[in-house]
Amino acid sequence: MIGQRIQETLRFWWRNIPALLLVTLPFALASELVQGTLGAALQADEEGIRVNELSALLILLLRPFAEGAIMAQMAAIHMGQTRSLAESLMFSLRAAPVLLVTYLILGIGVYAGLLLFIFPGAWLYARLCQAPYIAVLEQQTPLRALRTSFERTRADQWQILGAVALVFMLVIVLFQISGILFTGLFGDHAMGSVGLAVVTSLISCLLNIIVFRYFCLMTPGGS
């Protein structure tokens, strides 16, 4: 069953690359603009990894809008159509406040779980990952959406955990391959950094898609 869900995820992603790129491209470019202006959010040197707080904060604040736009496009594709960039952005503007609160609560819980030897955090994410979709697409409050996600995923929690973990590992591998290719082609040139950001933002959609697939399957009357 996990293999089938991953195949469905890859098929959905491959068939809808242009529509997904339409909504990921602006946010990838915006993130690169922020880092080009204020400096990289994360910088590695001899002393370790340093965080550029302002750059990191602005990029973090972009995430609910980016996630909302991707959500809008995936929901439209599931219904047999696609949204324009303007429609997706309008959707994300309306959804951003709810998504910000939902992701904040979800992130705090998962982070606390990760501190407990990683597995509890991964398990908690598998149980709560549908909450943003429930909050926005079913118009529930963030706390109610988190409870609903926990309830719906009870029966298939291990399957979801396995599928999400495998897709996450696939995304990491594709990130690494993309980084090697763009570094080899462009070196430290800004064009390579921008191109890599665009590609990795598109690849990241695989995680959105696997969660959205389970959301559709577990929604009452869904498929």
Image (spheres, helix red, strand yellow):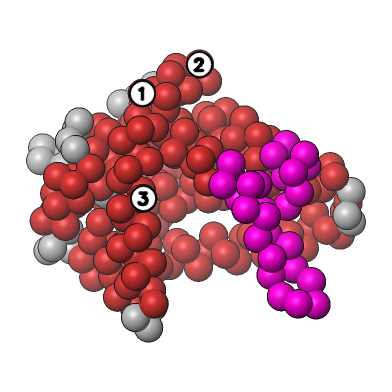
Q: Nearer the viewer, residue 206 or 28?
A: 28
- What's the amino acid at mark 2? Ala
Q: Secondary structure at mark 2?
A: helix
Determine crowd level at label 1: few under 14, some 14-19, many 20+ residues with C-alpha closer than 10 A. few
- Circles 3 and 1, Cβ within 8 Å, touching? The answer is no
Residue in the image at 13% along x and 63% along y: 154
Structural crowding at the residue carrying mark 3, measured as other residues with C-alpha within 10 Å and reported as few (<14), some (14–19) or many (≥20) = some
Residue 33's tag is: none
Mark-to-mark CA distance, 3 and 1: 17 Å
Q: Is residue 39 shown left or right of residue 165? A: right
Residue under label 2: 86
Q: Earlier in the sequence, mark 2 or mark 3?
A: 2
Amino acid type for the residue under numbered disc 1: Arg
What residue sits right under mark 1 in the picture? 94
The relative height of residue 59 versus residue 155 in the rendered view (above or below) is above
Circle 1 — which element?
helix
State the image coordinates of residue 48 (x, y, percent, origin top left). 71, 75
Placement of the N terminus among the 4 image quadrants: bottom left
| Residue 155: x %, y % from top left | 12, 63
Q: Is residue 176 left or right of residue 45?
A: left
- The magenta-colored residue range is 32-58
* Residue 56 lies in the magenta-colored region: yes
Quickly name the residue at label 3. Answer: 104
Kindly indicate whether the residue at mark 1 contacts the one at mark 2 (C-beta within 8 angstroms): no
Which amino acid type is marked by label 3? Leu
